[in-house]
Image (tube, rainbow, N blue to C red):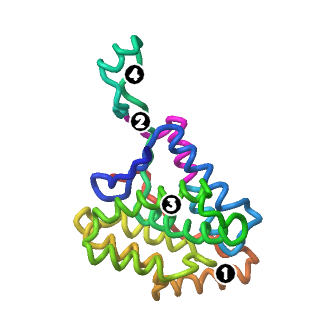
Amino acid sequence: MLSIQSTEQLTGVRISGDFWDLDALIQAIYQVTGDENKYYDYQGARLRILGICRNLRQAMHGEHQLEFVSNGLNKSILSRHETIFPTKNVYYGTEVLWPELLFTAIALNDFIRLHQELIDSSDWNGDVASIRKFQAAVADCLEQELTEDEFLVFLRMIHSKSPLTFRYATQYVDVLNLEYIDLNTQTRKAHLASFALRLMLEDEEYVALKSQLIEVASTTKKALHEIPINASYPEEILW
């Protein structure tokens, strides 16, 4: 079962699950986001999402965290079946910064919509169901950190705006990530809701950044999402 829990310092969340939980999510995201030749106006968002998939894939290979979770077996069951079997399963986990995770969950709405409009409109699509389950886990975790009113405002915003990440300047996610890292735990708690909304509101700071990036893109002939910014992450993050 996929698990998403806030880290101790509220820097981000820990995504964990068994090998097949993570593999199913990754494969679903690959299917719904399409290859690099699809949805060019969403390419920046797609690459951010695939960055999360890369972290999850590394976790599956044991490069991040391991934990052991009870699988429900007990002595009574084992003796009844006269077998020896582990009573715990291995869960693989990795941490993701809160702004990065929220952007991923938000952007996946656009790719689900595109997939349903252009590829498969079935209500029974398993890949979409897997992603919706992931988004629900993100929402459940976020709800625990916000007030009831803050969470309702977030839900209204995400349901009222579409598309959410069309030609999005994804460098802004780096800006928010770094700003969020610099806060202490109490301030993160107090301002997490505003960070969630800033990903969708396209405020003055976002508009100014995007204008600068468009200007550079026009002279360099690079795609918007390919323009680098001065975003230096700390070597170690206290989660």
Residue at image position (62%, 62%) is 47
Task: Decide: few, some or many residues near mark 1? Use Cα within 10 Å; few <14, some 14-19, many ≥20.
Answer: some
2 or 3: tag closer to the N-terminus: 2
**Residue named by callout 4:** 86
Which of discs 4 and 2 lies nearer the camera? The answer is: 4
Image position of 234 with respect to 175: above or below? above
Give the image location of residue 43, x and y in percent. Answer: 67, 68
Identity of the amino acid at label 3? Arg
1 or 2: tag closer to the N-terminus: 2
Identify the mark at residue 107; answer none if there is no mark: none
Q: Are the residues flagged by discs 2 and 3 in contact, CB closer than 8 Å?
A: no
Which of discs 4 and 1 lies nearer the camera? The answer is: 4
Q: How far apart are marks 2 and 3 (CA)?
A: 25 Å
Identify the mark at residue 132; answer none if there is no mark: 3
Q: How far apart are marks 1 and 2 (CA)?
A: 43 Å
Which of discs 1 and 3 lies nearer the camera? The answer is: 3
Which of discs 2 and 3 lies nearer the camera? The answer is: 3
Q: Distance between the residues labelled 3 and 4?
A: 31 Å
Residue at image position (44%, 47%) is 2
Task: Decide: few, some or many residues near mark 2? Use Cα within 10 Å; few <14, some 14-19, many ≥20.
Answer: some
Identity of the amino acid at label 1? Val
